[in-house]
Image (cartoon, rainbow, N blue to C red):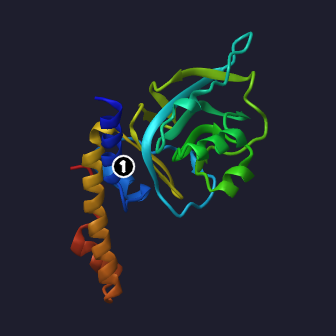
Amino acid sequence: MNLEDKALENKALVALFEGLDTSGVSDAMDKLGLPGQCLGVAPLDNYSQVVVGPAFTVQYVSASVPPGTVGDFIEDVAPGDVVVIDNGGRTDCTVWGDIMTQYAGTRQIAATVIDGVCRDVNKALGDGYPIFSKGRFMRTGKDRVQVQSVNQPVSIGTARVCSRDIVVADANGVVIVPRARAREVATVARQIESVEADIRARIAQGKSLKEARAALGYHSLQRKV
């Protein structure tokens, strides 16, 4: 598959999740028996939009002696990608700051997800660049960590992320959808959202919550089939 075909495929997969959020996707993942919720990774701000994009994965490890580089991988990230950084959950040093935020914005990168911390948060907040992390801390990662691999499987919270998996992120957090299951997950998520919309409509018509839920099978919506 050439670059143009890959870009078209990415666009088609992202479009599957238009109008969905992490809650609906998470319920669909539960129903299908798939893990993918990134425990402990939170949005830097209460973003009003949902971010969806293919993962560009990066793994950091503790620096060698002499130390290696934090890397210039950002040059290889395509517009619309989500940078997914595994720093082993470290909160004592950062792997993302204002220079990376600025460059990511100019390249139209969709967002950054970090199993670790970020810094220079005023730049990200001011630019409206979405970051999802385990917190914020000012100390640099230079000479403390180094890039171990790019576009290899990584761990974010308790979730495994492979290169080009579909990342869905919003004010609730981050969910990773295995690329091969993206269509199935999106279809189930839409089915669940349709039922929940019907429940909300019945409540608006004066039905009790118990009646509406019972009529539409709410309690088994995300249960494995």
Question: Between 189 and 27, which is closer to the camera in this rendering?
Answer: 189
Q: Label 1: state its secondary structure.
A: helix
Query: Looking at the image, how many numbered discs can be counted on the residues?
Result: 1
For the N terminus, which image quadrant? top left
Image vertical order of residue 193 relative to residue 161, above or below: below
Question: Between 4 and 136, which is closer to the camera in this rendering?
Answer: 4
**Location of residue 150 in the rendering, given as x and y in whole percent from the top left corner:** 51, 24
Q: Residues within 10 Å of mark 1 (few under 14, many from 20)?
A: many
Q: Is residue 207 visible?
A: yes
Amino acid carrying label 1: it is Val
Q: Is residue 220 visible?
A: no
Residue at horizontal 28 percent and vertical 78 percent from the top: 212
Residue lying farthest to the right in this orientation: 139
Question: Between 205 and 76, which is closer to the camera in this rendering?
Answer: 76
**Location of residue 41 in the rendering, given as x and y in whole percent from the top left corner:** 57, 45
Residue at horizontal 74 percent and vertical 10 percent from the top: 66
Residue at horizontal 51 percent and vertical 57 percent from the top: 172
Residue at horizontal 75 percent and vertical 41 percent from the top: 137
Question: What residue sits right under mark 1 in the picture?
Answer: 14
In this rendering, would 198 be left or right of 154?
left
Q: Quadrant of residue 101?
A: top right
**Location of residue 32 in the rendering, given as x and y in whole percent from the top left corner:** 27, 46
Image vertical order of residue 121 relative to residue 206, above or below: above
Q: Quadrant of residue 128?
A: bottom right
Residue lying farthest to the top in this orientation: 65
In this rendering, would 121 be left or right of 108?
right
